[in-house]
Amino acid sequence: MSATNVHYPWFKREDIDAFFALFQNNLANFVIITVTMLSMGFPASLVFGKVIPGAAVAVIFGNLYYAYMANRLAQKEKRTNVTALSYGISTPVMFIFLFGVLVPANAFTGDPQLAWKIALAAAFISGLIEVMASFTGKWVQRNIPRAAMLGALAGVALTFIAGEMLFTSFEMPVVGLFVLAVILLGIVGKVALPFKIPASLFAMIIGTGLAFSLGYADTGAIQEGFSHLGFYPILPSLDVFEGFQYLFGAMIALLAVILPITIYNAVETMNNVEAMKAEGDDYDVRECQAVDGIGTMVGSLFGGMFPTTVYIATIGSKKMGAGRGYSILNAGVFALAASFGIIAALSAIIPVAVVAPILVFVGISMVSSAFSKNKEKYYPAVAIAMLPYFANYLMTRFNNPAPEAIADLSPGIVPLGEGAMFTAIILGAMTVFIIDHQFHRAAVFSFAGAFLSFIGLMHAPNLQIAAAVDFAVGYTIVGFFLGGYYLKDVRSKHEQKQLKNTNAA
């Protein structure tokens, strides 16, 4: 039996570069999670003892499973040049969970521990939805226009990722500008950096050195970082189940955030897996979506609250000639880094302004991608889908401390920002179908907007019947208006067909 198997190596030299590329991508996310949660007032014991180990469990699970899938594909196709899929925390979804789930949960409860449990429940539900989406993902992809989905995500990218992180970068202007230049040079300009170090890793090393040497960072942070070293056991907990009673109670409006961003995550996994198929590695899309969902659910049972996904960076790993070893190594390193406080130490030592420019690049790449992955005629749909999250950003940042300032700017900011993900998709989809003169499909999305507004998933602070009646009426009127144009087109085509038949007779 063994004679029929190919020798697919556990590790090879090409896995080294691919490992560093994948590791620094995940490390940047872990550092951002740590610094953001600590700045929000979440206790270090929770972040380092629960959140980071739990998120690491999700990363470990997926990396090992995708290494197993790579071996299975290698044996099936009798070849050794199979590359395991890159996997980790989804950066855009991570920001949604930080600012769209954790922040409102913390504001509502006033209890960081309880807010974390609600976010755990949200992550578990997100994972479950993605598992279910593995059976229906292609239907979603066919029926929700890409311009609407990517436009909604680009709104998050422009405000909470690129915009917010650019502000943070400029808190240390010398360091922030230099790191941003390194990222643009190495990643955007594709210029080789010294020793062929990946741009983001080079930026973090040099940027951190600059921050300390120029006095922007206190050397006490190094001592603080080392103080976080220790043993953080990776243990399961039942905290996720306590969060369910709040998620499906007072915080049920969070479903307006969880559902669409999970659908996006499932579609993005599908796109990235299909991109690898074009490179020669044909993985089962549905299995990959299920793995991402299960990985998210497993992570939530250990304290992690961030959905995971297949990375488009897999294509880069494929071009490097990587196999499965880089994925296995990534799992092992994160197991050690989370268990012994290495991530906690790095998060304390590396200033946020050093990591922030990397996320600026991520944000602008997402905005660029939203346009480049769509035909030019759909650019208006992408643009309009971005705007609800601009309102959501203003609402999130200023409505609680200065509600009168937001109201003075416009009374429409808050309702536009509530349920922004749904609003973005609805408006973007309507625009796509209007551009294509598919007025019946545009009308369907308008009626969907009316329903979501009526029950409070859009334009309302809470989920309830008759939550935003004026918006529901507005979408309903628009739906009938668009439906009228559809009927007019049908009648016009029928008359043209009759005229053609008459002329033929």
Image (tube, rainbow, N blue to C red):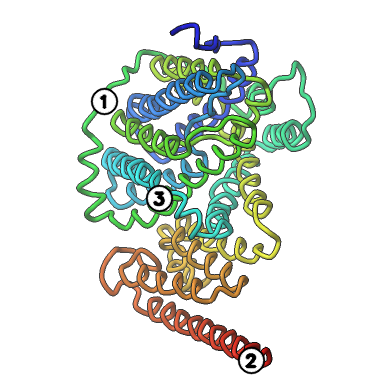
- Could you tell me which secondary element the residue under label 1 belongs to? loop
How crowded is the residue under tag 3: few (<14 C-alpha within 10 Å), some, or many (20+)? Answer: few
Q: Residue tagged by mark 3?
A: 136
The residue at the point 31 percent across, 71 percent down is: 467
Sequence-first tag of 2 and 3? 3
The residue at the point 38 percent across, 48 percent down is: 101
Q: In this view, does 493 lie to the left or right of 234?
A: right
Identify residue type, mark 1: Pro
- Indicate the position of residue 256 as horizontal and vertical percent values: 37, 57
When asked about the image quadrant of residue 472, the answer is bottom left
- Asked if the residue at tag 3 contacts the one at tag 2, i.e. Cβ–Cβ closer than 8 Å, the answer is no
The residue at the point 62 percent across, 63 percent down is: 383
Residue 236: which disc?
Answer: 1
- Could you tell me which secondary element the residue under label 2 belongs to? helix
Image quarter where the N terminus lies is: top left
- Indicate the position of residue 229 as horizontal and vertical percent values: 42, 14
Picture layout, residue 407 above or below residue 283: below
